[in-house]
Amino acid sequence: MDQLDQITSILALTMGAAWASGINLYAAILMLGMMGITGNIDLPPGLQILTDPMVLFAAGTMYIVEFVADKIPGVDSTWDVLHTFVRIPAGAMLAAGAVGDVTPALALAAGIMGGGLAATTHVTKAGSRALINTSPEPFSNWAASISEDLAVFGGLWAALHHPTLFVVFMILFILLMVWLLPKLWRGIKTVFRKLRVFFGGKDKPLAPGPEPRGTTTHPIQAESGSEPPDKP
């Protein structure tokens, strides 16, 4: 039973770190590092570096920057696009470090799965923000940003203190994403199609081409319906 609990805890931490990285990487690093440096949790060797003061300072600084950028319509989507190249690799690295002292093959497998989970949450966040930005008021952005931060802190807390519950939540989340991501993609394509029309990108009608040879109607035939005169 103790071994099963240990496996569940490792799985929850691995999935939690990757999942949170796709939403707000800096909040995830900051929370894990602070809980580790204060003694609330025992981080595995691969994540001990998160307790370094320099790492915490960098994560805290970038969290403040993201906290502001994430609440400005348009800027948040640009920020998400740029962080496609940051959140996903970082999620894979955190997942690989969360499994502890294991074989390289198992660490690599954890990194691959963690990168996939981080990509899923990142795409979901970026896609939903693109749809929210179609609304002119900023309050929906603020509500979404604050909700995402609270989800990261609450989700990691659950992963560390209630791992079984969190694993069940992750399974449900993955099933929800399988259903939701195609709908988000269709919504994003609709938004971009409307933007192309708005900015004059609508396809122009083609100019009428020349009539095929042999189908030209003789003027006299068109007027009187008689046959054209024979050439001498």
Image (spheres, grey):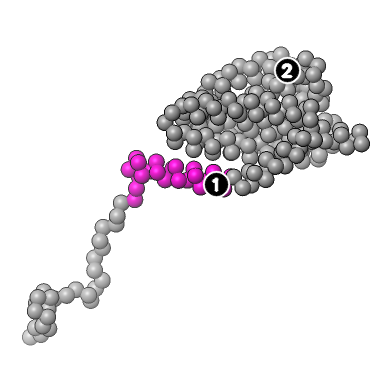
Can residue 194 be found in the magenta stretch?
yes
- Residue 37 position in % (x across, y down): 77, 16
Kindly identify the residue that appears in the image at 50 percent across and 32 percent down. Answer: 77
Mark 1: which secondary structure?
helix
Residue 5 visible in the shown view: yes
| Left or right: residue 94 compared with residue 128 | right
Kindly identify the residue that appears in the image at 34 percent across and 48 percent down. Answer: 202
Instruction: Kindly identify which numbered label has been placed on residue 183.
Output: 1
Can residue 197 be found in the magenta stretch?
yes
Kindly identify the residue that appears in the image at 70 percent across and 21 percent down. Answer: 31
Q: Nearer the viewer, residue 53 or 159?
A: 159
Q: Amino acid at mark 1?
A: Lys
User: Few, some or many C-alpha atoms within 10 Å of disc 1 (few <14, some 14-19, many ≥20)?
Assistant: few
Kindly identify the residue that appears in the image at 10 percent across and 83 percent down. Answer: 226
To which quarter of the image does residue 166 belong?
top right
Q: Main secondary structure of the magenta part?
A: helix
Mark toward the viewer: 1 or 2: 1
- Residue 117 position in % (x across, y down): 68, 39
- Residue 193 position in % (x across, y down): 42, 45
Q: Which residue is disc 2 drawn over?
A: 34
- Which range of residues does the magenta coloring cover? 181-203
To which quarter of the image does residue 172 belong?
top right
The answer to whether the residues at label 1 and label 2 have Cβ atoms under 8 Å apart is no
- Residue 159 position in % (x across, y down): 76, 30
Mark 2: which secondary structure?
helix
CA–CA distance in space, label 1 to label 2: 37 Å
Tag count in the figure?
2
